[in-house]
Amino acid sequence: MADQQSDDTGALLNESATRLFGSFDEKDIRAVEQGEWPDAAWAKVQDAGFALALVSEAAGGFGIASAEAISLLRISGYHAAPVPLAETMLANRLLSETGFDIADGPATVVVAESGAFTLAKHGSDWRIKGRAAGVPWARHVGTIVLLAAHENKSFVVRLTRAVASVAPAMSFANLPADDVAVDAEISDHDVRPAPANWTSQSLKAAFAALRVSEMAGALARVMEITVGYANERVQFGKPIGKQQAIQQQLAVLAGQAAAAGGAAEVASAAFDGVDVLAIAAAKVRAGEAASIAAPIAHQVHGAIGFTEEHRLHFFTRRLWGWRDECGSDRYWSKVVGQQAIAAGADGLWPFVVAVGAGQGA
C-alpha cells in the first residue's frame, strides 16, 4: 500500500511539474541568461514543494522514492526550466541527512576536490577557508552547502550567501556558475560531521546523477524539435524528413535520446546508495549522447538552428554545459577505467556485467 501511495504521489508530481515547467516561456529563460533572478518562476517551484522532493517525509518532504523525485528533473530539463531545482533538491537532501533544517529558499551545493575547503577551530566556533569555481546559481541563493575537512575528517557546512565572496560567471549553458571564496568565522551550529557515505567524490556523483536526468529531458526535447522541423521544412517539393539521409540522422538522434533516457534511469536508481561506478557509467553515456545528438540537430536545422532567435540553442547549450559539469566524460571514464584495471583480466567480464546491474540496467 505504501508503494502504491508513493507511485500515485510521484505521478501527481510529474503531472504538476509538466504543467508548471510548461508555463515558463522563452522570455523567462532569456531573462535568466541575462543575469536576472527568476523570482516569479522560483516562487511557483517553491510553492509546489519540488525543492523538497528528495527529502524524507519526516523531514518535511513528500516521502517518495528518490528515482521518482529525480524524474522531476527530466521534466525541467525538457522545458529548460530557468530555476536551480537540482541544486536545491540536492542541498536539502544533504542538509536533512545531516540534521540541519532544510533551506528556506533556493540553495546550491559546492562540488569541489577533497580539501578545497578547510575548517579550523576558533574558540567555540569555526573558521572556514577555501574557494571553488563554477558553483551553480551561487549569487542568487540564500544557502550554500559544501564539504570541508578538519583533522582528516569531513564536515557538512551550511553557509549563508552573505558569508561567501561570489564573483559572477556564466557556464557554457549561459546559466549562473559563479566563483565562490570563503574566509570567515561561522557558528558551530552551521558545521556537522558528514555521514560516512558523503565524500567529495560521492557528492560529485550524486550531483552528476541529477544532471543526467536533466540531460535526458533536454535530449528528448531536442529530438522532438528536430523531428518536427524535418517534417515541416519543405525542400524540392517535399519535407526534408522524407529524404533518406535526414531519416538516417534522425534515427541516430532518436537512438542517442533513448540511450540518455536509459542512463538517467540507471543514475536515478543509483542515487540513494551513491553507487559511484553506476553513476559514472551513466554520466559518460549521457555525455556521449549529447556529443552525438546535438550536432545532428543543428545539421538538420541548417543555418536557422544556429541563430539566437531559434529555441534549439537553449537545449543544446545546456547539453554541452551539463556534459562537463559534475565531472566531465574524461573524469568519469577514468573512474570506470581505473576500477576495470583493478578488476584484472579474470575479473573484467564480471566487472562489466555488474556495472549498473543493481539498478536494473
Image (cartoon, rainbow, N blue to C red):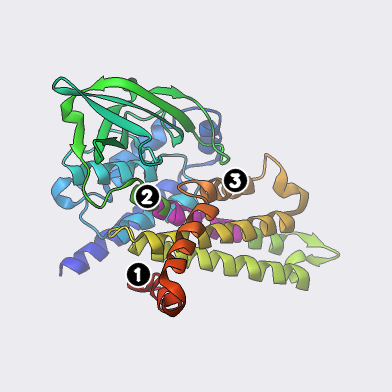
Secondary structure category for the residue under label 3: helix
| Near-viewer residue (326 or 77) | 326
Q: Give the quarter of the figure containing the C terminus.
A: bottom left
Horizontal and vertical percent for residue 52? 26, 46
Contact, CB < 8 Å: mark 1 with mark 3?
A: no
Going from the N terminus, do you reach mark 2 or mark 1 first?
A: 2
Using the image, determine if residue 341 lies above or below residue 172. Answer: below
Indicate the secondary structure of the residue bearing disc 1.
helix
Q: What residue range appears in magenta?
A: 209-224
Q: Earlier in the sequence, mark 1 or mark 3?
A: 3
- The magenta stretch spans residue 219: yes
Residue 299 visible from this viewpoint: yes
Residue 317: mark: 3
Amino acid found under the numbered disc labelled 2? Gln
Task: Name which residue type carries label 1.
Answer: Gln
> Does 257 appear above or below 105?
below
Q: Which mark is residue 359?
A: 1
